[in-house]
Image (tube, rainbow, N blue to C red):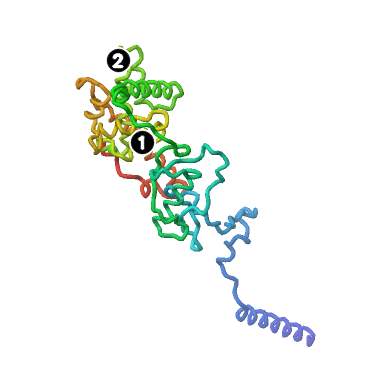
Amino acid sequence: MKVLSWSLALLLCSILLTYVRSQTSPQPDVGDLDGPDAGSENGEEEEYDYKRPEEPVDPCLTKECPKGMECETQEDYTAKCICQTSCPPAYNQRMRVCNNRNETVASLCEMERQNCMCKNKEPGCNGKGSARLKHYGACQYIAECTQDEKDEFPLRIRRWMTVTMFDLAGRGTLGQAGFALARGAIGSDTPWINPTLWKFCDLDVDEDGEINGEELEAITVPMMVIEHCITDFLKDCGGGGGISLAEWGECMGLEKDQVKNVCGDFQRERQAKEAARLAKEAAARGETDEEASPEEPSK
Ligand SMILES: [Ca+2]
């Protein structure tokens, strides 16, 4: 009987001790049971998406810099355009260009790099200031244009514009608006009209209805060496200022009723292409369409 009493006393002590421990020990966090280590309800181990820290994207990948400049990634991971530190070696003499000071420069890149440094007043500037591109290749003597040559010039440039337009159409690089005009010119008694109107639209990049001096360089610079009259002729055509469509048509020998504004389709194509380019750049930067959408084309 005494043994039974001692056994009961020990059992009660054991129960009491267990109760005291359960009240003083830290309680498990119920939330922990739902954590990644607790397993799912069906007992299977769930995969947990342990994300790696995102590596910063080089901001220069989507940064466009003006001519003569290159992108440099800053310490705070922003992109900054700086003057090009160097240009590819001008291994070929055909890379040389002639500037408007009649100086032969190793390459167009080198001329634009110099322009940048002079504009920013950097030590690398040659001290002469910015220069413009006169023509490709080393500087050479350009004969003056005689009156006879000038009189014949519209015929020559119309022929060149026609051949160029048909060539681009054949290669599929003219765009829909240009292709439609080229197709309309084929078989015509006056096949040069559409190419002449097309070239006006092509040169009027800012779409203000006239061709200014800078826009004119897109045709004078590549043609000056092979067609020495082009600069004098087009200078006279605009009377020293921009060339309107009516002036362009008259200079090229078109009748007044042959001069029509066909630029609308070109402009819409150009704007759509530019919008697509901007959207692509914005997508590369991870921006939304709304953040990146350019202004609605007004034309
Ligand atoms: Ca213009």
**Eyeballing the image, is 254 above or below 137?**
above
Q: Are marks 1 and 2 in contact (CB under 8 Å)?
A: no
Residue 91 image point, x, y percent: 58, 41
When asked about the image quadrant of residue 119, the answer is bottom left
Q: In the image, is the residue at mark 1 within 8 Å of ligand 1 by its beta carbon? A: no
Q: Which one is in front, 112 or 70?
A: 112
Label 2: few (<14), some or many (≥20) within 10 Å? few
- Tell me the residue at 59%/57% (across/down): 50
Q: Residue at x 41, y 59 (%)?
A: 121
Q: Is residue 211 above or below residue 197?
A: below
Q: At 42% from the left edge and 35% from the top edge, which residue is drawn?
A: 141
| Residue located beneath label 2 in the image | 190
Tag in front: 1 or 2: 2
3D distance between C-alphas at marks 1 and 2: 31 Å
Q: Which residue is mark 1?
A: 272
Q: Secondary structure at mark 1?
A: helix
Q: Amino acid at mark 2?
A: Thr
Sequence-earlier tag: 1 or 2: 2
Q: Which mark is residue 13?
A: none
Q: Is residue 42 visible?
A: yes
Q: Looking at this view, is 3 or 114 the one in front?
A: 114
- Pointer 1 local density, CA inside 10 Å: few below 14, some 14–19, many at least 20: few
Q: Nearer the viewer, residue 32 or 181?
A: 181
Left or right, residue 24 beside residue 201:
right
**Camera-side residue of 203 and 62:** 203
Residue 9, given in percent of the width and then of the height, sits at: 72, 85
Query: In the picture, which quadrant includes the N terminus?
Result: bottom right
Q: Position of residue 180 (x, y in %)?
A: 35, 21
As shown in the figure, which amino acid type bears the numbered disc 1? Answer: Ala
Pick out the residue farthest to the bottom.
2
Residue 155 quadrant: top left
Image quadrant where residue 214 sits: top left
